[in-house]
Image (cartoon, rainbow, N blue to C red):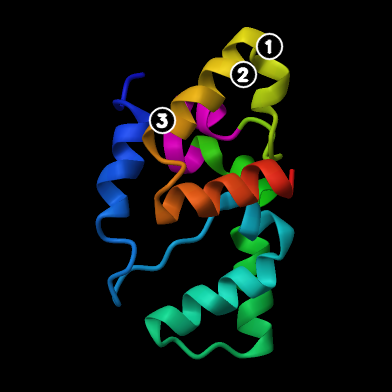
Amino acid sequence: VVWGCYFEYLSEWNKYADQENIMTITYEEVKENPALAVKDIATFFGIPLTEDELQLVVERSSFQSMKKNSEKTHGAFGNVLFRKGGVSDWKNLFSEDQNEKMDKAFEEHIAGTKLGKKLKYDVYCKA
């Protein structure tokens, strides 16, 4: 892909996953509970939020809000980045053979890593 191999990217970041100044969070976690995700991120950065501030961040960082403003924030590329906002839609885009190849590549490259275990749980178990 244009930005390089997804699995190489994750493998590189996995080296840092246990460091104190690194927080990992998945899109699936944010979609499941946006308020909790924002609280966790704010806590990680040591930023206190009132309930009103929390709700404002949740609203403005929602997929719908970002998609609505994507042309302003990302130009024509916004339509590419902000498609549907759901989880596991890739299952509808890939053929059965492509899904099997992705599963195999995932298992070979990152399944045993901390990030791989988190992604597998979020993507495969919650979706």
Nearer the camera: disc 2 or disc 3: 3
Q: Is residue 108 above or below residue 23?
A: above
Q: Quadrant of the C terminus?
A: top right
Quadrant containing the N terminus is top left
The residue under the point 32% across, 20% down is 2
Labelled pair 2, 1 in contact (Cβ < 8 Å): yes
Q: Residue at x 43, y 47 (%)?
A: 112
Q: Specify whether residue 79 is painted magenta.
A: yes
Q: Which mark is residue 108?
A: 3
Image x and y of residue 34, in percent: 67, 65
Q: Locate residue 80 relative to residue 75 in the image: left or right.
A: right
Decide whether residue 98 is among the magenta residues.
no
* Circle nearer the N terminus (2, 3): 2
Query: Residue at left 30%, top 77%?
Result: 20
- Residue at the spot of label 2: 99
Please tell me whether residue 45 is drawn above or below residue 18 in the rendered image.
below
Look at the picture and state if 62 lies above or below 46.
above
Estimate how packed mark 3 is, as few (under 14), some (14 to 19) or many (20 or more) residues with alpha carbons within 10 Å: few
> Circle 2: is it few (<14), some (14-19), or many (20+) Cα within 10 Å?
some
Q: Nearer the viewer, residue 100 or 53?
A: 100
Residue visible at 68% across and 84% down? 52
Q: Amino acid at mark 3?
A: Glu
Residue 101's place in the image compared with 53, above or below, is above
State the residue position of label 1.
96
Number of on-image labels: 3
Q: Position of residue 84 (x, y in %)?
A: 69, 33
Secondary structure of the residue carrying numbered label 1: helix
Range drawn in magenta: 72-82
Q: Nearer the viewer, residue 24 or 2?
A: 24
Q: Amino acid at mark 2?
A: Asn
Please give left or right for residue 120 compared with residue 13 in the image: right
For discs 1 and 3, the disc positioned in front in the rendered view: 3
